[in-house]
Image (tube, rainbow, N blue to C red):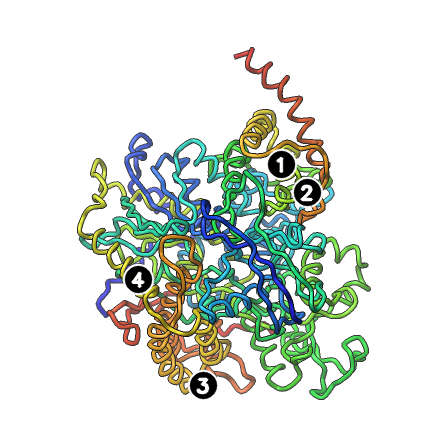
Amino acid sequence: MTLQLDPKVPPGTIEDKWEDHKFSVKLVNPANKRKFKVIIVGTGLAGASAAATMGELGYDVEAFTFHDSPRRAHSIAAQGGINAAKNYRNDGDSVYRLFYDTVKGGDYRSRESNVYRLAEVSLNIIDQATAQGVPFAREYGGLLDNRSFGGAQVSRTFYARGQTGQQLLLGAYQALMRQVDVGKVKLHTRSEMLDLVVKDGRAVGIVVRNLVTGEISRHSAHAVVLATGGYSNVFYLSTNAMASNVTAIWRAHRKGAAFANPCFTQIHPTCIPASDEFQSKLTLMSESLRNDGRIWVPKNADETRKANEIPEDDRDYFLERMYPAFGNLVPRDVASRAAKRMVDSGKGVGPLKNGVYLDFKHAIEREGQDAIEERYSNLFEMYERITDENPYKVPMRIYPAPHYTMGGLWVDYNLMTTVPGLYAIGEANFSDHGANRLGASALMQGLADGYFVLPSTIGDYLGQFLNQPVVDTDDPAFEESAEQVTANINRFLDSGGTRSVDWFHKELGKIMLEHCGMARNAVGLEKALAEIPALHEEYRNDVKVLGGGDNLNQSLEKAQRVDDFFELAQVMCIDALNREESCGGHFREEHQSAEGEAMRDDENFANVSAWEWTGDPSSPALNVEPLDFENVKLSTRSYK
Amino acid sequence: MNLTLQVWRQAGPDAEGGFKTYQLDGVSEEMSFLEMLDLLNERLIKQNEEPVQFDHDCREGICGSCGVMINGQAHGPQLGTATCQLHMRKFEDGATICVEPWRAAGFPLVRDLVVDRTAFDEIVASGGYITIDTGSAPDANLIPVPKVVSDTAFDAAACIGCGACVAACPNSAANLFTAAKINHLNLLPQGQSERWTRVERMVDTMEGFFGSCTNHGECEKACPKQISIDFIAMMNSDYVKSKFKNRRLASQS
């Protein structure tokens, strides 16, 4: 343990910490803000909202995205909604309750102070988004509507049909483009960050490849912010977009940023099951469907009748049976594991027996097809396009799939990583969701970080560099980084191997899903840790990347991303092996109760594991941040 | 399924392009159109031919990255469906399928099936927003928005910025995209302060890149979100009004 993990949690009661902290941090005078240059990588909800807000404040911002437009970031695909403790429904919600639900939902593995701030700021996010013109669902009286989501017993989720992510991202993207128009933000599209530049222990810039021309360029700044999302694509098949990757945060990790809780990955219960071996990704069906859909499997594993012909007596509504209090709305990790147990016991449905039913028959009988259409029509249409089955008539088939990664770069209360001057926001950091994220909380966290937290905390660091120029891009630190990036690219172009990048990615994904997926055990993890480095070695010697480096070459882009996934995969397995307990999305088969429920070990593992790069992905150094629970009492999560 | 594919290959913006014919067997009906292209690319890599470059990302029909002309139709034959959501069961075994990039002067070609849609970002930057600095918003429920207004604004806001409307238009006009962006904001109470400057600036920016609308209606048919061309009429109406509204304001200042 060599890092000083100072979470910098402010003193005071949980309710006062954020207000007091905002007062105590150093501010930058409005006229001086333009003297500070900040690089923001990624333009999803976190990155776009941060870039827009920092531009409005007057900072000199450069934003980078590997997409052709900021609006394509994968935040766009979020369907269900965004939580906020508005209590518009008068159902007993409060900031404290949202805080409490989130800490509990995360299975007591998050930092209380950060979560409370998230709940506090949630109120402002809804105000901000509404003012930007985000068309949230409304009641006939013209005021905002809400719905309920897994892990909560109040209705606090704001939504925009089944495309809440797109509408919120459009709001942030439009605010960003306004700053681009007035010249406060310089936008670089189709530009991928391939290295972080560190000088004298501080983050001073990045090295970037232009994906169209292949040009390698260097960019210097007073601070660097990574908003580059999560790493579920390490599993190959996930709900992430095809290009989502770990490269930016991984390369920052290799430059000194600790990687926290890499094994905390979320498997989302409601995705469309894979249909064949050519499947390139899995499609999520919003968790909101669990409000009205009932999940079941046939009681008999040898059932051959069609879904609609199976009488009620022969159906097992297993979530309602096992968790009567929350029923179909138990948190994601609980729902996923229950579905896996059903499929593993041979009761799976569909041609490959790899799913469970999500049935809307009762909701349609109760409320009419119109009401269901109003809520979910676009999801139902998407389901039908993909499966050729009509979910108004036959139950949907769903199965869990890798979806979100709670782990990420370790950050303190200010969202700064262990490298001074390097910040991580949104899914790229580890901060707020503990071992399991509740539905509709990812959008909330991305926007909280970008609109409200980072812009308030970054000045505290920047202030010390007033009137100091940024590091020259001819500096040896930049030189070395750029050379490394170029060498890395050439290595793939010259490899002369025989198998495609995708072939290796699929193989890696199979190992990870099998041994580091919904359920893990020591034997499997050890096996994965033997297989991954061997496959990685093979990859480096035998991958085939055609074409050159000076034009658009999607295989070359992917080759580097997959290379980083190989290293990350090892640290994920090491983390999963080290964490001898079951909590949230991390389920170690050795640690379960007689009924198969997760068993935490608060004595030894009420902490964050932050892994430090040592030059060898098979032996990272462990650093531990203990977690104190002063407000939410540690207890066994029960949704019964 | 066995298919004959005619795919547009072009090494770069200035290189000469042309169709190349590929035979592809082993295609499953369960595949999406892009998974079929993945399969083609895997085969090409085996034969040491560079894979076909195409834009794609979410594969859920929402990011707007993908989009190709399939047998001359933007996003192919299925109504209201982006290329990534189109499945091979919509094609016959033995079919010949022609795959081309979006063709429009406003979308310069990058490589193979990839085009540059930066012009859309420029249109948005020229007014496709509501000016509200972070932190200055009033409570969200302060301004009720009639549900019908909110729903109509949403119908416009559903645009995913894929560019199919431009590709389908005989004039390469971007009126449906621009109208969707404008009306999303112009219909809402929050968008009224900038209504007239917004429409004027955005339409003027659009005309710098794209052709003019002559009401063919191809855009509406190609749109994967089935956005109605009624929005173009509403944009035109606002644009005409802006010439009075904006000029009157100018004379007052």
Residue B219, numbered circle = 2
Choose mark 3 or mark 4, whichever is in front. Answer: 4
Q: Residues within 10 Å of mark 1 (few under 14, many from 20)?
A: many
Q: Farthest residue toward the top?
A: B251
Q: Real-space Cα distance between discs 4 and 1?
A: 42 Å
Residue B145 in which image quadrant: top right
| Residue ID at (56%, 84%) | A595
What SS does tag 2 mark? helix
Say what amino acid the circle numbered 4 marks: Asn
Q: Quadrant of the C terminus of chain A?
A: bottom right
Give how far across and how far down residue A464 sits, in percent: 22, 42
* The one of B186 and A429 positioned closer to us in this rendering: B186
Q: Real-space Cα distance between discs 2 and 1?
A: 9 Å
Q: Real-space Cα distance between discs 3 and 1?
A: 62 Å
Name the subunit of mark 4: A
Choose mark 2 or mark 3, whichever is in front. Answer: 2
Give how far across and how far down residue A61 sits, in percent: 36, 40
